[in-house]
Image (cartoon, grey):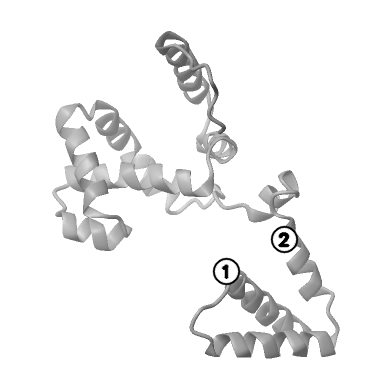
Amino acid sequence: MANQDSKLSKNEVDKILYQLCLAIAELKDPNEAAELLRDLLSYKESEMIAKRLKIAELLINGQIYQDIQETLKVSATTIARVHEWLQISGDGYQKAITRTKGAIAKQSTNKSIDFENWSTLKKKFPAYYWPDILLENIVANANKKQRAQMTAVINKLNKAKEKPAIYKKLRRLIATNNNVLK
């Protein structure tokens, strides 16, 4: 978000945060919560928040920093921040972890929440995802000769030390479409 000249007062921010808390509390099920989080946060922000909660859970369960680092691919600094917060207060972490223990076990057998519903996001925000949509359509509608040219480019990029960000996506799309057409 852009930085504005006039900042909100602490009282105004508190009211807005309270409204957010009310909105979360009024949700009926985890699917609605997932929808709200998908609308409010970027994927990276969601991942970061989820990892903090998992770090807290692992610390509460006695895991050591090194194990948490390896499991969640987070820095020792991040773990230390969560650990410090647990020592200072941590009531929110404690309640969330305690109340969700049984639900998490149930969810592992029930796969109804789709946190990464890519096609829905693309439909909802086509302008943001237009490069991905365009690339998918180009690969899907390519003829045999065009697909062979794309495969040749991918093969050359395989040998390159540095690969552009789009490399993995293009490689996956071509492999998927080549397998579908065989």
The answer to whether any part of residue 50 appears in the image is: yes
Residue 2 position (above or below residue 10): below
* 4 left or right, relative to 68: right
Residue shown at the point (57%, 52%) measured from the top left: 116
- Looking at the rendered structure, the kind of residue marked 2 is Pro
Q: Which of these two is toward me, 4 or 79? A: 4
Residue 131 numbered tag: 2
Asked if residue 89 lies left or right of residue 1, the reply is left
What percent of the width, then of the height, locates residue 109? 45, 54
Q: Are marks 1 and 2 in contact (CB under 8 Å)?
A: no
Kindly identify the residue that appears in the image at 14 percent across and 33 percent down: 87
Q: Of callouts 1 and 2, which one flags the residue occurring earlier in the amino acid sequence? A: 2
How far is the residue under mark 1 from the one under mark 2? 12 Å
Q: Is residue 75 left or right of residue 179?
A: left
Residue 81 in percent (x, y) is at 23, 41
Checking the image for residue 165, the label placed there is: 1
Crowd class of label 1 (few under 14; some 14 to 19; many from 20; radius 10 Å) = few
* Residue in the image at 84% along x and 74% along y: 141
Percent x, y for residue 32? 57, 34
Q: Residues within 10 Å of mark 2 (few under 14, many from 20)?
A: few
Q: Quadrant of the C terminus?
A: bottom right
Q: Residue 90 is drawn in which quadrant?
A: top left
Residue reaching furthest to the top: 11
Query: What is the secondary structure assignment of the residue under circle 1?
Result: loop
Looking at the rendered structure, the kind of residue marked 1 is Ala
Q: Is residue 182 above or below residue 34?
A: below
- Which quadrant of the rendered structure holds the N terminus? top right
SS at badge 2: helix
In the image, taking residue 11 as reference, residue 167 lies left or right, namely right
